[in-house]
Image: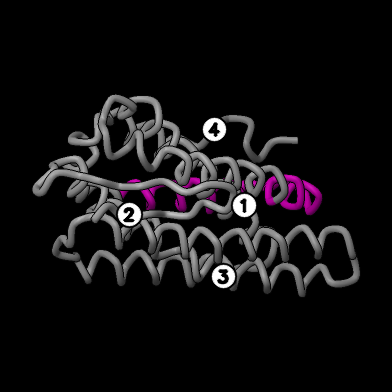
Amino acid sequence: MPDRIVTGRSSLVLALPEGDRAAIALATLLPLLGCGEEAASLAFDGLAHHYRDDDATSRALTAIARDERVHDVLIGAMLQALPDVPVDRALLQDARHFHIVMARGGTGLHLARIAALDAAVCVLLGRLLREGRSLAVLHMVAPVLSRIRNDEARHVRLSRRLALDLGTSSAMRDVAAEAREALADMLSPVGDALEVLGVDARSLDRDIRRLPDGLLVA
């Protein structure tokens, strides 16, 4: 029986042939995207508390925390509809640890890391949606991936603004660049899966490692 994923406004059905290489590749990639969602929701809840004296900002950060929890559910639903694949538990543990320690160094550095990392996730999702659009599995999950990408773009705008409000510094840019490098390192072991999904893994790696020039410049 086909599996149904509810995206909030609509639903989609995955009816994939057994052994579909693209479906297996997506099932290999998604756990890496999903492992940071719970940590991200907790991080944004913490930031909302930090900005509790600024009602509008606190509400916006709380809404982002809610987005991240929804992303966690959506990624879980996609994985349930995809083939079971062996999980690299060491890689996932490293990824979870990375997301947990993103808050070190204070609010400004935390926001800089978030802006850089979420912008990189937008790059990844954009490549999947554009370069893999001819693949049936990506065509069917495109509404979910598009929703996540659009949410992450909003998260980048807010975290960037808040970071810039605290003043730019070389330290902010340094930790932002380190966050991008860490994400690229985490994606490196799934390069073959990205290629199956139509994404040029080498080009993606290069672009994720490069911190956008204007990201943390007022």
- Mark 4 Cα-neighbour bin, 10 Å: few <14, some 14–19, many ≥20: some
Image coords of residue 75 (percent x, y): 40, 58
Asked if residue 25 is positioned above or below residue 97 in the image, the reply reads above
SS of the residue at dot 2?
helix
Query: Magenta stretch: residue 168 in it?
Result: yes
Residue depicted at 45% across the width and 43% down the height: 145
Which tag is nearer the camera, tag 2 or tag 3? 2
Residue marked by disc 3: 104
**Of residues 52 and 214, which is closer to you in this image?**
52
Residue marked by disc 2: 30
- Is residue 119 in view? yes
**Mark found first going from the N terminus, 2 or 3:** 2
Residue marked by disc 1: 112
Residue depicted at 67% across the width and 72% down the height: 45
Residue depicted at 64% across the width and 64% down the height: 66
Q: Which amino acid, mark 1?
A: Ala
Q: Give the side of residue 23 with respect to residue 126, left or right.
A: left
Identify the mark at residue 212; answer none if there is no mark.
4
Q: Which amino acid, mark 4?
A: Pro
Asked if residue 21 is positioned above or below residue 45 in the image, the reply reads above
- What range is drawn magenta here? 159-185
Q: Quadrant of residue 139?
A: top left
